[in-house]
Amino acid sequence: MSTPNLHPGLNLGTRHGAAHEGAETIVFGFWIFLMSDLVIFGLVFASYLTVANPMGMAGGPGPADAFDLRSVFIQTMILLTSSLTFGFATLAMRHEHGRKTIAVWLGASLLLGLGFLVMELRDFAHMIEVGAVPQRSGFWSAFWGLVPLHGLHVTIGCLWIVVMLVQMAVLGLIPVVKTRLLRLGLFWHFLDLIWVAIFSIVYLGGLMP
Amino acid sequence: MSNAILGRLDLASLSIWRAFENPTSSELIGAGAAMLVIVGGLAAVILLTWFRLWKPLWRDWLTSVDHKRIGIMYCALALIMLARGVIEGALMRTQQAFGLHGGFLAPDHFSELFSTHGTIMIFFVAMPFIAGVINYVMPLQIGARDMAFPVMNQISLGLTATGAALVMISLVLGEFSTGGWANYPPYTGADFQPGPGPDYWIWAIVLAGIGTTLSGINFVVTIYKERAPGMDFLRMPIFCWTVICTSIIMIFALPPLTVAALMLAADRYLDFHFFTNDLGGNMMNYVNLFWLFGHPEVYLLVIPCYGIFSEVISTFSGKRIYGYMSMVYATMSIAVLSFCVWLHHFFTMGQSASINVAFGIASMAIAVPTGIKVYNWMATLFRGRVRMTVPMIYATGFFYLFVVGGLTGVMLANPVISFQVHNTLFLVAHFHNVIIPGVLFGLLAGYHYWFPKAFGFRLHEGWGRAAALLWIAGFSFTFLPLYWLGLQGMPRRSVTFSDPAFQPMMWLALFGAALIVSALGCIAVQLWVSIRKRDQLAVPLGDPWNGRSLEWSIPAPPPAYNFAVLPQVSVRDDFAEAKADGRAYAAPGQYEDIEMPDNTAIGMIVCVCSTLLGLALVFWIWWLAILSFAVMILALIGRTFRVNARHVIPAAEIAAEHRAWLARIEAAPAVDRLEETHERNLGRAVLERPGRLEAAQ
């Protein structure tokens, strides 16, 4: 527990000792929470795969009737870019570029996250139009259980960014704010990972001939 | 049917009103239970007001983040719910004893009884009791000052209490699910049970389940990051190893339950088709998800109890645990295997024979590490200086009965036998046979063993013995006959039966249920008598049983900061070795200030808001659901702005307290093992190996 470089990406204090050891516990706990959350997504993916077949679709619309790959591809790019901007925020924190720079990068990530959500909601509206609603079939129930669950996580992430922007202004860059930003970063990148799986399994897999 | 203010809550939701309109014996029993909840709640309020206890309750308990107080609150919750669960069990036994062509309960009421009985016993007795014991004991055993996340710990307790409260409220408002503790759809879907019953189950389980997942994270992080200097993993007491395994199960096995319950909620509230009969729903997904949780769950329950028995048997044999490493490996193997066997809960539900065989073999394999543990415990007893105190009586009962339960489990793991006896009372007998002697006896042994540590006085030995023997006899008379009935083909969950051949065994089981009720009575009397005689039973010096691990090296009850100076651990069973070497009770060179977290009301805010949220969702009171959820989220966000919620206990204060205690130790008579249940026992044990002490000096 006394290894020197616990979180080299963080400048937690003038002398890293106590602040780093505190961060160690908190960040480790958050990793475990993410593992638990990953199990939730894994199970929802598994449920989706069991009904991604004609029987699950019950004669209703299928993926080809409702998915818009162009829109989904743009969403993927937006989300991946938001991870990049978040990475810049973390780097700005590490190299002590000041609150303003961090806030700018966080703001960029927030805008991209919101942009993703807006595009996703437009997609959902289209699906409702063509009758691909969860009440139609087991397949669409599983889809609406999975993809909006990710969207809900992104919404929480956006809310969290807002809270962090306020905390940076009110509390300053104290160690606990920095570890919160670090955890938010983990969460944000985790959502990217989930989205990559959604894009590959749900959208690409669904549209595969 | 549904209005804007009260949702679907109306006069007919009141079970007392229903009994008034339709006074059958079944409805009157339901109304009686509702009255009991209301009168009990009112009595609690009146007593708290009369004795002016609201303020201390709020200040010292409800807002406390001390892991010890949170642990005690968990155990208190579990004991209250245990009383309800036992009464329901006895009521079901009575119904079945008179159930030849009739009885006095309506079928739906009987179904509600077995559903609440199972839900309560698993989620609101066994789990909080285990969380309570872990909360209390584990940080003390590893030499920590508190859990890694004290405030989250309080929130977990709040969420567990929410689930228990919802199940209690269901006695007064509406009704509970009739779908058993597993609540299988489509029977629990909106088509077959449109009422609030399954919704109570869903929200009680989801909210309490989130609390349990957070507890698991807290436990495992505490063990990984908060151990005292020198407390290597392989120096930890076996109980802490079992806590790691249980936490892993909490973190990975609770999500399937949450997912299954929320999908069922989507089916019921939003007309989704996850598990419906029509439109591509797949009810087998529910069954898989549920048991993907359900099977690890039973190991979540029993593994810490193995840990408790390891501590108890080792202490009361005056020996270190035999085969420490094999215990660690066995516990880990059980935890891993527990994730690989869920399918044996539904061998008959249509998968291919080869899949059944694979899961059958995996299930039988669990008997191997479990067997290793049993042999290790026996080897620990071998040539030990064994004292038959109350925890050891429970341990003895556990040995005999749990092995029987384990062996019938191996029988059930064989798909061929499972096809014959599935859904009969044989199964009911089997799982009670592992859960009562394994989990409940373990927890009661732990309750008796650590009670003096928590409160500074021992529990009365005589009443404890009576309770333990009654539990053992009561269990045997109640559940062993059910094996026979199951083999004769009597289905489980039957409100009545028509074959008179079943009746003698039913009467025997009723006799056993009466013994169990009296065992529970003995536990209540024991608590009362012990509190009255607390001066004679006092063990303030903290080591009444000649203990071996760190929790016994501090006063009873321990100070809020646990250890005046964090212990430096050098071997396994460090405190036993320290006593033998003369290192124990040494005055430290210097004391330092200790920083501890402040009290907070956030756990109670979450508890109240989530209870209102659960009720609002059950009765479709949407404005209340939105309001309580929003308040909860805002409170949690607001809490994150309080960053320095800690206070410092000055070194001088700690030094004074610690030195006073050391002086009392110096002055106190040390008692021999044979006198540990005597009044002379003040919590200082005589040295076991004076020869070794002389050599060390």
Image: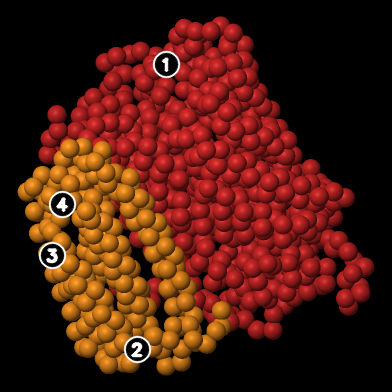
Chain colours: A orange, B red
Q: Is residue B402 left or right of residue A100?
A: right
Say which chain tag 4 marks: A
Q: Position of residue B98 (x, y in %)?
A: 51, 11
Say which chain tag 3 marks: A
Indicate which disc residue B445 carries.
none
Q: List the residue tagged with mark 1.
A: B105
Q: List the residue tagged with mark 2.
A: A94
Q: List the residue tagged with mark 4.
A: A64
Q: Secondary structure at mark 3?
A: helix
Q: Position of residue B554 (x, y in %)?
A: 67, 65
Q: Do the residues at pointers 3 and 1 share their chain?
A: no
Q: Residue at x 29, y 51 (%)?
A: B609
Q: Position of residue B265 (x, y in %)?
A: 28, 41
Q: Residues within 10 Å of mark 4 (few under 14, many from 20)?
A: few
Q: Is residue B381 left or right of residue B502?
A: right
Q: List the residue tagged with mark 3.
A: A70
Q: Is residue B437 visible?
A: no
Q: Secondary structure at mark 2?
A: helix
Q: Secondary structure at mark 1?
A: loop
Mark 4 vs mark 2, CA separation in Å: 45 Å
Q: Residue at x 44, y 78 (%)?
A: A23
Q: Position of residue B212 (x, y in %)?
A: 44, 52
Q: Nearer the viewer, residue A142 or A174?
A: A142
Q: Nearer the viewer, mark 4 or mark 2?
A: 4
Q: Which is more N-terminal, label 4 or label 3?
A: 4
